Amino acid sequence: MEGLEDYLRVISGWECVDGIIPGMIVRQNRGRGSKGLFLKYATASGYKLLYKNGTSVQELFVVCKDRQAFERLFKESFSDAG
């Protein structure tokens, strides 16, 4: 998805991240709502993220060894994203 690669490049460089697993892509009929990368909730192995570009939503699952470090880095890096 357009624009997602820049976010992934940043996140994949963090020491606490072991992997990024893509999930479902859902197409939206209208380009409404917020755009960017959003931290949704903690999972057993890390976090679920959503990337929204106005026409689609991409699920991403981040596998990380230190959830607190990931959440801190995410908020510092993408404070406007979610």
Image (cartoon, rainbow, N blue to C red):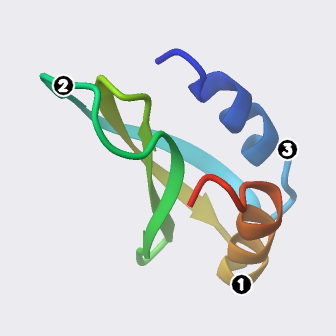
Where residue 34 sits in the image (x, y, percent)? 42, 46
Q: Residue at x 84, y 54 (%)?
A: 14
What residue is pinned by disc 2?
30
Name the residue carrying label 1.
68
**Callout 1–callout 3 Cβ contact below 8 Å:** no
Residue 69, relative to residue 9: is it above or below?
below
Quarter of the image where one finds residue 80: bottom right
Q: Which of the two residues, 56 or 12, is positioned nearer the viewer here?
A: 56
Q: CA distance from mark 3 to mark 2?
A: 33 Å
Front residue of 54/23: it is 54
Residue 70 % position (x, y) = 72, 70
Judge the density around disc 2: few (<14), some (14-19), many (≥20) Cα neighbours within 10 Å: few
The residues tagged by marks 1 and 3 sit, at their Cα atoms, a distance apart of: 16 Å
Of pointers 1 and 3, the one earlier in the residue sequence: 3
Q: CA distance from mark 2 to mark 1?
A: 35 Å
Q: Which mark is residue 13?
A: 3
For the point 87% across and 59% down, the residue is 15
The kind of secondary structure element at disc 1 is helix
